[in-house]
Amino acid sequence: MALSVTDANFDQEVLASERPVLVDFWAEWCPPCKAMSPTIDALAEELAMSVKIVKLDVDSNPGITVQYNVRSMPTLILFKNGKPVDFKVGAGQSRVQLVKWIEQHAA
């Protein structure tokens, strides 16, 4: 299961992480976010040794959402060494595509 992060602990959990971090920006009212949630949670367990996967509720955490200019849900941003290195917007990626994308940046 992916860890929930907030505006308060984002720096510690994401920016200070020694592993690459995938942040899933989601909202309770977003059907594509809910559709992707089981895949994101499964990948959090499957890839736990190489990548940290977290979720950030955009409605409860406007500071980080605005800071990274997230305007559509779901948005996935991959951080490495405390910096965003790539992002995907929308729920159009299959599990296999997500794994390939994550592993490309996690190396």
Image (cartoon, rainbow, N blue to C red):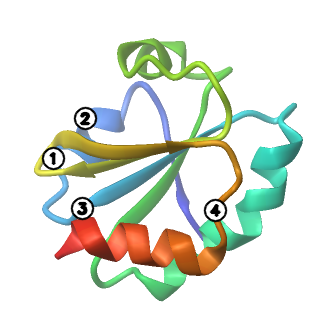
- Asked if residue 83 is positioned above or below residue 97 in the image, the reply reads above
Q: Earlier in the sequence, mark 3 or mark 2?
A: 2
Residue located at (25% from left, 35% from top): 11
- Residue in the image at 41% along x and 44% along y: 87
* Tag 1 residue: 16
The answer to which of marks 4 and 1 sits earlier in the sequence is 1
Q: Residue 100: x percent and y percent? A: 42, 77
Distance (Cα) linking label 3 and label 2: 13 Å
Q: Disc 2 marks which amino acid?
A: Asp
Image check: 62 left or right of 84? Answer: right
For disc 3, the marked residue is: 20
Circle nearer the viewer, 2 or 4: 4
* Amino acid bearing label 1: Ala
Quarter placement of the C terminus: bottom left
Up-down relation of residue 98 to residue 66 (above or below):
below
List the residue tagged with mark 4.
Answer: 93
The answer to whether the residue labelled 1 contacts the one labelled 2, judged by CB atoms less than 8 Å apart, is yes
Q: Amino acid at mark 3?
A: Pro
Local secondary structure at mark 2: helix
The CA distance from mark 4 to mark 3 is 19 Å
Q: Within 10 angstroms of label 3, few (less than 14), some, or many (20 or more) residues?
A: many
Q: Quadrant of the N terminus?
A: bottom right
